Image (cartoon, grey):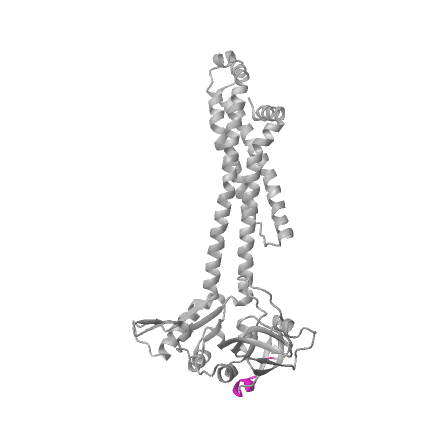
Amino acid sequence: MNITNLLKIALRALNNNKLRGFLTMLGIIIGVASVIAMLAIGQGSKRSIQEQIAEMGSNMIMIHPGKDVMGGVRQSADDMQSLKLTDFFTLHDETRYLSAVSPSVNSSGQVIFGANNYPSTIYGVNQEYLEIRKLSIDEGEVFTDQDILSSAKVCLVGKTITDNIFKNGEDPIGKVIRFNKIPFKIIGTLTSKGYNSMGMDQDDIILAPYTTIQKRVLAITHLQGIYASALREDLTDLACEEITALLRQNHKLKEGDDDNFDIRSQQELSSMLSSTTDMMTVLLACIAGISLLVGGIGIMNIMYVSVTERTREIGLRMSIGAKGRDILAQFLIEAILISITGGIIGVIIGIGASFAVKNILNWPILIQPWSVLLSFAVCSITGIFFGWYPAQKASNLDPIEAIRYE
């Protein structure tokens, strides 16, 4: 018996039991659709996080004072004063793998203009901080080297600050705001960047010369951090090694001494978040894959029922010359047809559900071809695997006993 005849017989059998065939497919449909939708959401979240990290500066390096032990008591990094201006100048002048370096000091407090006030944080940095953090000027201008030398009371503000302080729509350029009673003249506004992947408002920011914050706000001479940017993302590790060597030399640390500073890069953060989203994607896909397993068991169950119902038919076919492998192929083709048809419908529903999630919930999605092919391949294998045993049972029936079956 050729494959065409077997295919016709399988299609006729499925056509005679349309509702039963559809209900059997339902498990496969739900499983495939769930896997595609879950993978699309997981991959979309991963890409969204990577894009937002890139907007923050994918080659950014953050240096902060490290924890230390004094008198048997572990000190907090906030209490450490291990980073000095000399460290900043060393990194600025002597590194080969950095494109920009900025000191960093900050203070939290109330921003006041007239009767309006808003809690925020002011950051003391230099001009290169804008390049490091991928910030840009919307209106006005950035502070100058002379402003840094003279500790000028000037600042740049983000959109969140202007929206909450200048509620009547005033032009912020040239206005004087107070931060903890210290006046600052606004000389520029920053282009809006919105929220990042960790839910932080990137527009809730005030930038001023680092010398101004050191002397007039905090009254300190040390640095709370140093921000840098590697020449390229692939040079981040080399840049971190170079920074470590220079700072250890500056701090006169001997071989075997622990670093009294911490270095973190956006590359580390990106890798950590990517691995987390990958793990969650796999977990979601596994949960969705359970539906495929349930669908496969449904196929096996229905094929067993079909073999029982058509026992006499099998006996007649075998008595007029059909071989065991023909009977095996007949029932196996039925199982594969159920599985593949369910898989095709599931792929269509899964893609549709993914776009529905994107349009209704505004979640990022990314449908990759491999996820569709994987889901379809798994459902095909499921049909073969769970359809094989009932088909094998049918092929092993004794023709005489099958004809006598009531």
Q: In front: 96, or 300? A: 300
The image position of residue 146, as x and y in percent, is: 55, 87
The image position of residue 315, as x and y in percent, is: 52, 15
Q: State which quarter of the image contains the N terminus.
A: top right
Residue 258 appearing in the image: no
In reply to whether residue 145 is colored magenta, the answer given is: yes
Query: Which image quarter: residue 176?
Result: bottom right
Query: Which image quarter: residue 49?
Result: bottom right
325 over 283 or under it: above or below: above
Residue occupying the point 56% across, 54% down = 44
Q: In front: 212, or 29? A: 212
Query: Which image quarter: residue 352?
Result: top right
Residue occupying the point 47% across, 23% down = 393
Q: In front: 137, or 325? A: 137
Question: How many numbered discs?
Answer: 0
The magenta region covers 142-150
44 over 199 or under it: above or below: above
Q: In front: 178, or 46? A: 178
The image position of residue 98, as x and y in percent, is: 47, 74
The image position of residue 237, as x and y in percent, is: 43, 67
Q: Is residue 259 left or right of residue 168?
A: left
Q: Is residue 80 left or right of residue 140?
A: left
In reply to whether residue 241 is colored magenta, the answer given is: no
Q: Residue furthest bottom?
A: 150
Q: Is residue 74 left or right of residue 53?
A: left
